[in-house]
Image (spheres, rainbow, N blue to C red):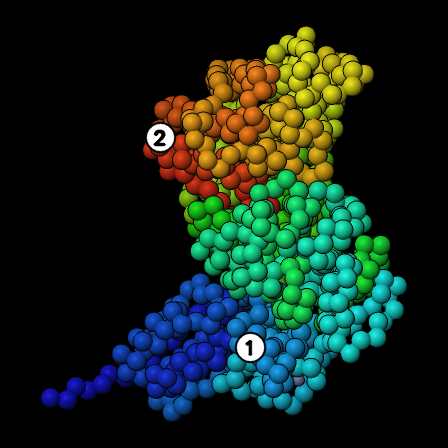
């Protein structure tokens, strides 16, 4: 018996990052493989395919379309409907269809792929050592796009006319550079130039070789990379590192290191399988790895007092060649002065980085969007600390259809978020909104996202803090354009950002631990227990209030926080004698006592971050800081890896009820720590006991709140949860008590995630 083969036509629509990533040639090859006829084309919003053939081939084609998609493609949705055949005789790639108002997802920049790497180091290849090698599977995308549809004339590559050989690759559907918009070669592509700090060219046959010699000689180089300039020096040369720190005005904040390959990384750090995967992923972020202090030739000056080192692998051809040429790991940090945005243009870099870099390695492929390196840590699963290169502007998918909203984020580690349909376009890391340059970068990047994704916001969401530049911007814009503006409480936004990335609606018990957030009662919150969902937020508990002595001064000088806890909780007559903190001079002590009495410029705070600071200062770990959260971080680093007999040891605390709100009283905790210090208990043990206590506070509060509310799901958010030890202890304590625990993965738990939470809350606001 002969079965008649049923021929059918499938109309397929593919959404996601499917343009500029080699999707059409992939569909073309796949259709030919399965002997299917029809066509594929880009539209403004998706890729459309019509294929016909027998049912089994169609089914295989559809399956492979998702499972074998090119590495840079990210498929959101494949929709197929079936019809009678039309009688196509071949398969072709058709002209793109442009549709008004439609938008598409834009691919992030992606690290150099294996095929390109091979060419890069093959002496016979025409792209041998060409620092701008790329293909449809790798290279710049977001940083060079000015508008959609993604075509060369709408990128900063338009000034380079392709040579016949490149053009041929570009036009051939079977070539891996088919429609690779940044396609280039040494003949027709961008080029490098090495100049001194005055902009005078340095004569060199090979700019990378010359740059490498300078790095090996201890010089500091500004290198124009993918999304901006990086400052580089020999990561094994302490003197060069100290120079860089002094010139960049960054005395202690950890610097990232780029190592040539995985083997080199393992010379300096322990790498788990999960971390290895992340290091080698197309996103290629900086990964915080456990440092092998005893054997690593990278001196502690790169990340003073830390157990972890931020390491990444080369992600552009330029980096690959440079790292191979130098043969040493390089410090590779953002090209900026202190907290300004990363420099991106040649002139700008020569102006702004003058006095920091000895030499500049420039190129002439313009960067349209500033783009810092992303930072991740692996705690069970990968967790974003800073989300930028490789990730943005790929959206966070929402479990609902959102209104067009602009959420302006917080002050530090700012990101903004624009929503449309199921997409939350969380911007790349913008920076600390404390200067004009960062505000400009913020405004320009909002403009770019609005244009790329065709979003005209109707609602503007912002933090309640009246002094944040992002708040002022939000109020100005909404007034100017007559838009609805919605204030969102900081910690509510933290918790909702965690909920939405986990696609959970709530209600949950939200534990929001961070440094600073404006509370609805005018005090500064930061050790909060909330009952929250996308819409509502009720504060049900918090850490005990103490005055933030001198406002910002208390943040920069943790010893002031320690004194605030001591005098407020243990009485004004408390004697600091014999404690490390007694080094504070008596005149300042008197001023502090006066401040405490009169409560001048000393708002109340329930901040968990400040409590960490205070304990760090009290225990003599650090009294003054050079970067955000330094004291708390160094306290964490001191805790022993093996807790042994101290596993369960903690300090006492109590919980009282102040009207409907539970308050964690901390007097006993502070006084017992003081006792431990006086009894010369080693600081690592004090650190461990304190971390255990914080985890117990979280567990105890959640248990009580759960009993009253019936809610057994907990979300952990806020910058304090970057503390891995605390996160681990808290999650394990909560699991033991039977809670479901939600943590961050895709978006940072720090203020870099705030804008996502703001957007979601504004979407459900009934104002
Ligand atoms: Zn490639
Ligand atoms: Zn060429
Ligand atoms: Zn925060």
Quadrant of res 506: top left
| Residue 704 relative to residue 754: left or right | left
Query: Does the image show residue 217?
Result: yes
Dot placed on the residue nearer the N-terminal end, 1 or 2: 1
Q: Name the residue under label 1.
A: 118
- Identify the residue at horizontal 19%, vertical 87% (top origin): 4
- Identify the residue at horizontal 57%, vertical 66% (top origin): 111
| Residue 66 relative to residue 251: left or right | left
Residue 182 in the image: state x and y as whole percent.
63, 75
Q: Name the residue under label 2.
A: 737
Disc 2, SS: loop
Residue 571 in the image: state x and y as whole percent.
64, 9
Q: Quadrant of the C terminus?
A: top right
Say few, some or many: other residues with alpha carbon within 10 Å of mark 2 (under 14 / 14 to 19 / 20 or more).
Answer: some
Disc 1, SS: helix
Nearest the eye: 72 or 727: 727
Nearest the eye: 710 or 620: 620
Q: Is residue 311 above or below residue 568?
A: below
Q: In this view, does 37 lie above or below 46?
A: below
Q: Residue furthest left?
A: 1
Q: Quadrant of the N terminus?
A: bottom left
The mark lying in front, picked from 1 and 2, is: 1
Say few, some or many: other residues with alpha carbon within 10 Å of mark 1 (under 14 / 14 to 19 / 20 or more).
Answer: few
Query: Does the image show residue 461?
Result: no
- Identify the residue at horizontal 85%, vertical 62% (top origin): 197
């Amino acid at each position: 018996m002969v079965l008649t083969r049923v021929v059918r036509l499938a109309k397929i629509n593919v959404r996601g990052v499917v343009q500029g990533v080699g999707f059409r040639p992939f569909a073309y090859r796949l259709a030919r493989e399965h002997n299917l006829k029809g066509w594929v084309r880009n539209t403004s919003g998706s890729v459309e395919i019509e294929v016909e053939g027998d049912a089994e081939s169609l089914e295989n084609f559809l399956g492979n379309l998702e499972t074998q998609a090119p590495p840079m493609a990210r498929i959101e949705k494949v929709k197929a409907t079936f019809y009678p055949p039309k009688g196509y005789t071949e398969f072709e790639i058709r002209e793109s269809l442009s549709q008004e108002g439609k938008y598409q997802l834009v691919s992030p920049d992606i690290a150099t792929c294996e095929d390109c790497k091979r060419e890069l180091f093959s002496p016979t290849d025409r792209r041998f050592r060409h620092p701008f090698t790329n293909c449809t599977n790798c290279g710049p995308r977001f940083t060079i796009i000015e508008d959609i549809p993604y075509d060369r004339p709408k990128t900063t590559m338009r000034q380079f006319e392709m040579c016949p050989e490149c053009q041929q690759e570009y036009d051939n559907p079977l070539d891996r550079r088919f429609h690779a918009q940044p396609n280039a070669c040494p003949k027709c592509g961008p080029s490098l130039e090495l100049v001194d700090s005055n902009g005078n060219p340095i004569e060199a046959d090979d700019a990378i070789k010359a740059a490498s010699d300078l790095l090996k000689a201890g010089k500091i180089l500004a290198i124009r990379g993918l999304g901006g300039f990086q400052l580089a020096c020999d990561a094994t040369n302490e003197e060069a590192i100290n120079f860089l720190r002094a010139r960049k005005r960054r005395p202690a904040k950890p610097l990232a290191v780029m190592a040539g390959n995985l083997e080199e990384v393992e010379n300096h750090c322990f790498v788990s399988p999960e971390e290895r995967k992340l290091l080698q992923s197309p996103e290629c972020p900086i990964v915080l790895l456990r440092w092998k202090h005893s054997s690593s030739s990278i001196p502690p000056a790169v990340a003073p007092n830390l157990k972890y080192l931020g390491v990444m692998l080369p992600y552009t051809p330029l980096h690959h060649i440079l790292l191979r040429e130098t043969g040493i790991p390089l410090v590779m940090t953002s090209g900026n002065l202190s907290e300004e945005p990363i420099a991106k243009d040649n002139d700008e870099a020569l102006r702004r980085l003058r006095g920091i870099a000895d030499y500049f390695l420039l190129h002439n492929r313009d960067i349209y969007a500033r783009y810092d390196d992303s930072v991740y840590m692996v705690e069970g699963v990968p967790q974003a600390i800073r989300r930028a290169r490789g990730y943005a502007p790929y959206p966070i998918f929402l479990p609902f259809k959102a209104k067009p909203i602009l959420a302006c984020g917080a002050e530090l580690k700012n990101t903004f978020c624009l929503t449309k349909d199921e997409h939350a376009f969380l911007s790349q890391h913008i920076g600390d909104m404390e200067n004009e340059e960062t505000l400009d970068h913020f405004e320009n990047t909002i403009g770019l996202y609005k244009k790329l994704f065709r979003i005209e916001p109707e609602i503007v969401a912002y933090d309640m803090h009246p002094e944040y530049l992002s708040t002022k911007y939000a109020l100005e814009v909404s007034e100017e354009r007559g838009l609805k503006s919605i204030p969102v409480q900081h910690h509510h936004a933290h918790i909702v950002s965690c909920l939405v990335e986990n696609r959970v609606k709530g209600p949950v018990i939200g534990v929001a631990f961070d440094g600073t957030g404006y509370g609805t009662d005018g005090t500064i919150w930061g050790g909060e227990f909330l009952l929250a969902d996308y819409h509502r937020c009720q504060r049900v508990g918090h850490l005990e209030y103490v005055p933030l002595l001198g406002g910002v001064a208390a943040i920069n000088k943790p010893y002031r926080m320690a004194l605030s806890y001591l005098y407020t909780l243990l009485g004004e007559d408390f004697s600091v004698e014999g404690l490390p903190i007694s080094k504070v001079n008596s005149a300042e002590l008197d001023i502090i006592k006066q401040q405490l009495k009169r409560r001048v410029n000393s708002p109340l705070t329930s901040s968990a971050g400040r409590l960490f600071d205070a304990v760090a200062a009290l225990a003599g770990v650090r009294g003054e800081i050079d970067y955000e959260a330094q004291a708390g971080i160094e306290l964490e680093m001191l805790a022993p890896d093996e807790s042994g007999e101290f596993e369960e040891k903690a300090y006492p605390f109590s919980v009282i009820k102040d009207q409907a709100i539970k308050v964690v009283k901390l007097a006993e905790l502070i006084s017992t720590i003081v006792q431990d210090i006086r009894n010369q208990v080693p600081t690592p043990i004090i650190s461990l006991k304190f971390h255990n206590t914080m985890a117990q506070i979280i567990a105890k509060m959640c248990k009580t709140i759960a009993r009253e509310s019936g809610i057994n799901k907990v979300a952990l958010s806020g910058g304090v949860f970057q503390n891995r030890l605390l996160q681990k202890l808290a999650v394990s304590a909560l699991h033991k008590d039977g809670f479901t625990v939600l943590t961050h993965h895709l978006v940072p738990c720090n203020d870099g995630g705030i804008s996502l939470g703001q957007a979601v809350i504004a979407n459900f606001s009934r104002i």
